[in-house]
Image (cartoon, rainbow, N blue to C red):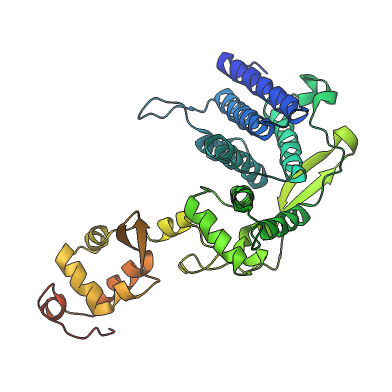
Amino acid sequence: MKLRREAAILKKKALASIRRAARSFNDLDEDGRTTSVLLHLQHSFEMLLKAALIQRGIKVFDPGDGKSYGIGKCVNLATEALKLTISEAGLIRTIDAMRDEEQHWFAEAEEALLYAHVRGAVTTFDDVLYRIFSERLADHLPIRVLPISTEPPVEIQLLIDREYSQVKKLLAPGSRKRPDARARIRTLLAMEAHVSEGVLVSQKDVDRVERAIKSGKPRTVVFPRLGVLGTDVGGSGIAVTVRFTKKEGTPVTFVPVDDPSAAAVREVDLQRTYYMTATELARKLGLSGPRGYALRQRLNIDGDPKCRHDFKFSKSTFPAYSDNAYTKMKAALGELDMDDVWKAYGPGKSKAPIQKP
């Protein structure tokens, strides 16, 4: 294989970063260790994916601003062009989400949980390196420097349950360890990137999870996405491999995203569901703003939680509408006379009772 010059440079950077990640993981100094591990791991994957994409002749620069793509876009391109599996993409997104929390705030992960992800990252890096460049990670560094642990890998569901129980203890009355609990919550939220794209950890999500745990809700309700996560462990000793998988047929109940009261729903999910302003909704229906308002009043759209959700930022409230609102209003336009709706429900024209079509 003839290696493109840019791909060779990026691959070299990827290998350098994963060596530093391994060195940081095995460091005896705990201060800043997790942060260093995640920073280097995330960078190693971004460089590796860019090297692989360039080797395949795929552009990695945004045609608009001319900047190179971030890791999220690279993962999407690699899924399409490099046969990156769903599980591999999920692991890389999770490493990125965990790194984001460590770099911009702070999080905390049990050692066994960190080891599972680092070992899984080494396995995935090796798989992708071989798939694209026909090289093994062991060709570039002694196997003795790979991340090692005195404990064998633990099945991921047991680790998640253990972490959830620890958070409950830290949030118990009189514990005075709320910041530690919230740091662990951030790690669990970041891990949802294994099974969902676009995961962002916000203060509102952490608050939501904290309230749910304090109210006694089980882990399957608070973190339903994590219920499908599994691990496939092979090998032994320092040659162990860890691959994250999705379980089939796991008895997990997913809460509808249009139920904003549910403990499992993220703020980012709500923003995807309720994404239209009143003006955008009216325009999509071919109506003026005032006529859109009249039709919403006629159908009680604003009183239906499946159609409208209010987002609160600081002291301001911003209503937003979902596809459910559009579907109901679109269907009503074929049945109602908008002139009659306007006369009865136009702004300031009438206090007529709200009716169903």
Q: Nearer the viewer, residue 246 or 44?
A: 44
Q: Quadrant of the image for the N terminus?
A: top right
Q: Is residue 332 above or below residue 186?
A: below
Quarter holding residue 255:
bottom right
Which image quadrant: the C terminus? bottom left
Residue 115 x %, y %: 76, 40
Q: Residue furthest top?
A: 5
Using residue 288 as the reference point, say whether residue 270 is left or right of it: right
Q: Is residue 313 left or right of residue 212?
A: left
Asked if residue 311 can be seen in this view, the reply is yes
- Taking the spot 83% from the left edge, 33% from the top edge, the residue there is 148
Q: Is residue 207 above or below residue 40?
A: below
Residue placed most toward the observer, 216 or 141? 216
Q: Please provide percent x and percent y for residue 245.
A: 72, 50
Q: From the viewer's perspective, is residue 228 above or below residue 351?
A: above
Residue 333 in view: no
Examine the image and state in which quarter residue 166 appears. Answer: bottom right
Write the residue at 65% across / 43% down.
91
Residue 16, percent from left and from top: 67, 20
Q: Is residue 139 left or right of residue 90?
A: right
Specify the farthest residue to the front.
Answer: 174
Frontmost residue, 213 versus 218: 213
Quarter occupied by residue 247: bottom right
Q: How many marks?
A: 0
Measured along the vertical axis of the image, is residue 84 above or below residue 333?
above
